[in-house]
Image (tube, helix red, strand yellow):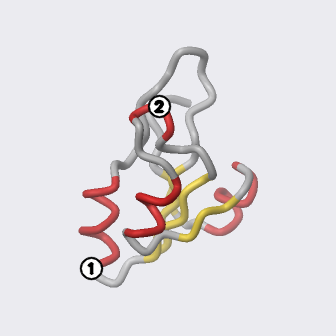
């Protein structure tokens, strides 16, 4: 499965749909995860943390929605 983790766009929303530990679990089970640049910045988990969990970082939300078959978000 290809999973996308976009950055939340609501004002003062600092959470992220999937933390790095969850990403590690999914990638260990052979799923592909894409995260939007800055997705974990609100929880002090930057791109380097997601890259260490073998996640590809994409620059924009449109790229996440195009690449992923499922996206993990908090609010619509």
Locate residue 19, reporting x and y percent. Answer: 34, 49
> Does residue 61 sit above or below 8 in this rendering?
below
Which type of secondary structure does the marked residue at label 2 adopt?
A: helix
Q: Residue at x 29, y 68 (%)?
A: 24
Query: Upstream in the sequence, badge 2 or badge 1?
Result: 1
Please tell me in which quadrant of the rendered image residue 9 appears.
top right
Q: Residue at x 40, y 69 (%)?
A: 52
Quarter of the image that includes the N terminus: bottom left
Which numbered marker is on residue 19? none
Give neighbour class at mark 1: few <14, some 14-19, many 20+ (Cα, 10 Å). few
Q: Residue at x 48, y 69 (%)?
A: 55
Quarter of the image that includes the C terminus: top right
State left or right for residue 10 relative to residue 1: right
Q: Are marks 2 and 1 in contact (CB under 8 Å)?
A: no
Which type of secondary structure does the marked residue at label 1 adopt?
A: helix
Give the Cα distance between marks 2 and 1.
25 Å
Q: Where does label 1 land, which residue?
A: 28
Locate residue 25, reporting x and y percent. Answer: 24, 68
State left or right for residue 30 relative to residue 1: left
Q: Residue at x 53, y 15 (%)?
A: 12
Q: Where does label 2 land, which residue?
A: 42
The furthest residue to the bottom: 30
The residue mark sitting in front, 2 or 1, is 2
Counting the numbered discs, the total is: 2
Locate residue 47, reporting x and y percent. Answer: 52, 55
Give neighbour class at mark 2: few <14, some 14-19, many 20+ (Cα, 10 Å). some
């Amino acid at each position: 499965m290809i999973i996308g983790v976009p950055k939340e766009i609501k004002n003062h929303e600092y959470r992220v749909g999937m933390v790095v530990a969850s990403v590690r679990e999914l990638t260990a089970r052979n799923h592909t995860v894409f995260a939007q640049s800055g997705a974990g910045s609100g929880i002090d988990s930057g791109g380097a943390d997601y890259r260490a969990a073998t996640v590809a970082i994409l620059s924009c939300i449109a790229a996440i929605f195009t690449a992923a078959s499922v996206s993990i978000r908090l609010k619509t």
